[in-house]
Image: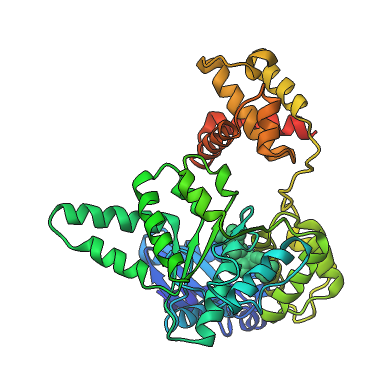
Amino acid sequence: LWDKLDEELKNDFTQVSYRTWFSNVKPIKFENNKLTIQLPSPLHVDYWQKNITSKVIEYSFQITGKDITPVLVTEDQVNDAKQEQEQKQPFPVADDENNQLNPKYTFDKFVVGKPNMFAQAAALSVAEDPGTTYNPLLIYGGVGLGKTHLMQAIGNYMLEQDPSKNVVFITSEKFTNEFVSAVKKDSNGGNEMEKFKEKYRNVDLLLVDDIQFFSSKDKTQEEFFHTFNDLHKDGKQIVMTSDRLPNEIAKLQDRLISRFNWGLAVSIDEPDVATRTKILQSKAKYAKISITDEALEYLAEKVDSNVRELESALSRVKAYSKFQGTKAVINTQLVEDAMNGLDYSTKIDRNVDINEILEKVASYYNVQVKDIKGKKRFKEIVGPRQVAMYLSRELTNASLPKIGKAFGGKDHTTVIHAYDKIKKALKNNDPQIKDEVGDLKTELLR
Ligand code: ADP
Ligand code: MG
């Protein structure tokens, strides 16, 4: 196909222009009626898109009788993809999902600033002196703030000191699944519980990520309680992360909460602009991105939510600069262009007042504030009440007990329950909740 195409296209261009736009161009894949063509530069891609693609489509149809879509890629993109694949094969990139330590999550790569200073210090003491200082250590805070990174840094540190140590990293979800599946197999005459116990009672360091998902899993909690006791008694270190404090986790057994309180709980807060700048500087250094300080500061101002967002913004800027084909140092203008039209700032000015939320929600759903604050449990009231509680947690700095109080003296677990319920609905893309919460948020933040 390509040779025939090339023949046809050649006739449409002068010699000079053919040489300019067709040398170093090669077809690299033809699959499912998609023809992937490699071009030498982004400039070529632009030109091809404007002037050549339509001809390719037309001629391919004449030649094959089929609708063929050209896909244009640059050499760089092809190389990047290759490199990524190569990197992936020899080292299985460990991540939260396959429950291995990610070798990149080290103390060296963890940037310390005001919001994570205590958490980092506590983690380092535990790494240097496992089982004696703070046991268990619990790191808690919002998403993308570095909890998993810091926890795994302890594991990587321990293995660096002594590779024979047995470090187990597991999410609470995976722990639950393993346990449930072991129980099931044993009820059919297996011996899985033995293996399960063996695995978890023989560790030197147990890292359990996101323990909030133990909520409501009674049998698993019981098993974890025993695991915890055995390890603790033997002086083995346990580290956990959570998005909230144990006593704020709904349906977590009291005996677990009390065990968790034996050690230390440290929070990681959202990074301030100074910390964000430092993190970006470090990430740019490790990723070998040349970018001016001013451009980094600009980015740090703009992306004010969490570290994960910072990372993806930086990748975006890198990709954009590559696409521009310039080899120059990335400056503020380029960052601005790359971020153009994107709303990276998901953090909200937490200046909303709970009473205002109550009023807005009441009028939106056509109910009374006093009913939201009251004890009625009709569907017409419960729904708005949960939305209002969700918004109070999202948009204000008020603590859970304080929110409970503002809602007519409700227990903080009620607030957590409502919050989780709405959050889950949003996560599952429930269209109605999404619209309603969206409307209210816009209204409240105006
Ligand atoms: P969490 O577990 O709190 O949701 P992660 O530990 O997964 O967050 O962190 C999200 C990303 O941000 C990771 O790639 C992590 O390496 C990075 N990160 C978070 N905090 C820092 C920090 N202080 N310094 C460097 N990288 C960080
Ligand atoms: Mg995490």
Image height of 381 relative to 238, above or below: above
**Front residue (pair 45, 320):** 320
Which residue is at the far front?
233
Residue at x 74%, y 63% (from the top left corner): 338
Image height of 2 relative to 387, above or below: below
198 left or right, relative to 91: left
Residue at x 64%, y 18% (from the top left corner): 372
Residue at x 55%, y 58% (from the top left corner): 241
Image quadrant for the C terminus? top right
The answer to whether residue 329 is visible is yes
Way the structure is coloured = rainbow
**Front residue (pair 419, 136):** 136
Q: List x then y, in percent, for residue 284.
A: 72, 76
Q: List x then y, in percent, for residue 410.
A: 62, 26
Q: List x then y, in percent, for residue 38.
A: 53, 77
Image height of 65 relative to 417, above or below: below
